[in-house]
Image (cartoon, rainbow, N blue to C red):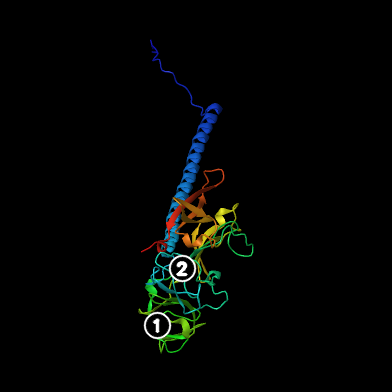
Amino acid sequence: MLKLRYTGYCFTKQSGLGLVELLISITLSLLIMSGVIQLFLTSNQNSIAVQGASRMQENIRYALKRVGDDIALAGNMGCLNFASASILTDNGGAVGESINIGEGDTKLRYKYLNNFLPDVTLGAESWNNFEEYFISGGANNMDSDDLIKDGSDTLIVKYIDNSSAISITGYPADNQLALGSTTGLTNNDVVFAGSCDKMFIFQITAVNPVSSTVTMSNMSADHGIQNSLTVPFLYAGNSGSYEYSIRQAVGASGACADATPLNCSLYRSFNNNDQELVLGVSHLDVRYGRESGTAIAYDDVLTAANADNIDRVKVTLRFNAVDTTQGSGIQTKNITRVFAIRNQFER
């Protein structure tokens, strides 16, 4: 007789995923995908914020270095000694007349000397009356006709570049100087001519490389350079007037204003040549410091009453960068530095 033995095995038929399982799988996949997307977006925002902060930090370092270097040179007039007892000046005397300022008098140490420039705008407007203070500027500019951001200050620094010195070897005519070399000199250049006891400002009208001479505008025999007790030099190159201001950035989509700081840049202008230094600087505030009793007082405006005693400059710059992690989309930082005017201190 045939016997069937029960083995206990149960055979079932697989018919595929059910609707519930499918919905659960889709839900889990969407949750995982949303997490990955959120992680990517957060990482991207953090990357933009970090890059913006790094770029802003580098902009801060560079901008303050350029401003500080110029302020450190402000008032440099070659080997001219500020404490000299006899300085030729057109303040208080005729051209060619020497006056005694006294060793302790700082008033005239803070001014450039004779200005032989014609009475016209030459390059930057600050060239006019160049014998005025070698640190100056405008407060809260509101001139709608210029390119400077309204409400922002300007800073003007003037100095001589010692590395550009060219020896003066003779005086062929009242309005001419013979030089050791005319290399790099061109018509309309504004140059400084002088020695360790005299300094003048001229504009070149003609350069003769054959005779190695230059002709100057508004120059006459009473300039007195040939009577100098020391060897005179002509200074060109980077000698002159530099103006710092906030203006619209190159390629900006709109005007530079408080509401659109990303359209602003810090500019450094030299002889009517506007150079964009740093993108993302939207405000410049300048204050002039002086000793007032036992404290330091800062003035917003340089006036005749306080200008002669100014020995430091407080500069505040507002930097910005794109930051998508913040509601405003922009991160900003105000940086303030105080720079000493080295040529205002006795040496």
User: In which quarter of the view is residue 213 placed?
Assistant: bottom left
* Position above or below: 297 against 16: below
Does residue 191 appear in the picture of this structure?
Answer: no
Q: Answer with left or right where residue 345 lies relative to residue 330.
A: left
Q: Work out which quarter of the rendered image holds the N terminus and state it.
A: top left
Q: Which residue is at a point 46% across and 78% down the rendered structure image? A: 97
**Horizontal and vertical percent for residue 28?**
50, 32
Residue positioned 53% across, 32% down in the render: 27
User: Is residue 257 or residue 193 the one in the foreground?
Assistant: 193
Tag 2 residue = 108
Label 1 sits on residue: 227
Within 10 Å of the Cα at label 1, are there few (<14), some (14-19), or many (20+) other Cα atoms? few
Q: Which mark is residue 133?
A: none
> Where is residue 343 shown, x and y percent of the image?
41, 64
Residue 98, located in which quarter of the rendered image?
bottom left
Q: Quadrant of the C terminus?
A: bottom left
Q: Nearer the viewer, residue 42 or 262?
A: 262
Q: Amino acid at mark 2?
A: Leu
User: What is the x, y in percent for residue 173?
Assistant: 45, 89
**Nearest the eye: 269 or 47:** 269
Other residues around mark 2 within 10 Å, as few (<14) / some (14–19) / many (≥20): some
Distance between mark 2 and mark 1 Cα atoms: 21 Å
Q: Position of residue 279 (x, y in %)?
A: 50, 58
Q: Is residue 266 visible?
A: yes
User: Could you tell me which residue is drawn at 51 percent across and 59 percent down?
Assistant: 306
Whichever of labels 2 and 1 marks the residue nearer the N terminus, that label is 2
Residue lying furthest top: 1
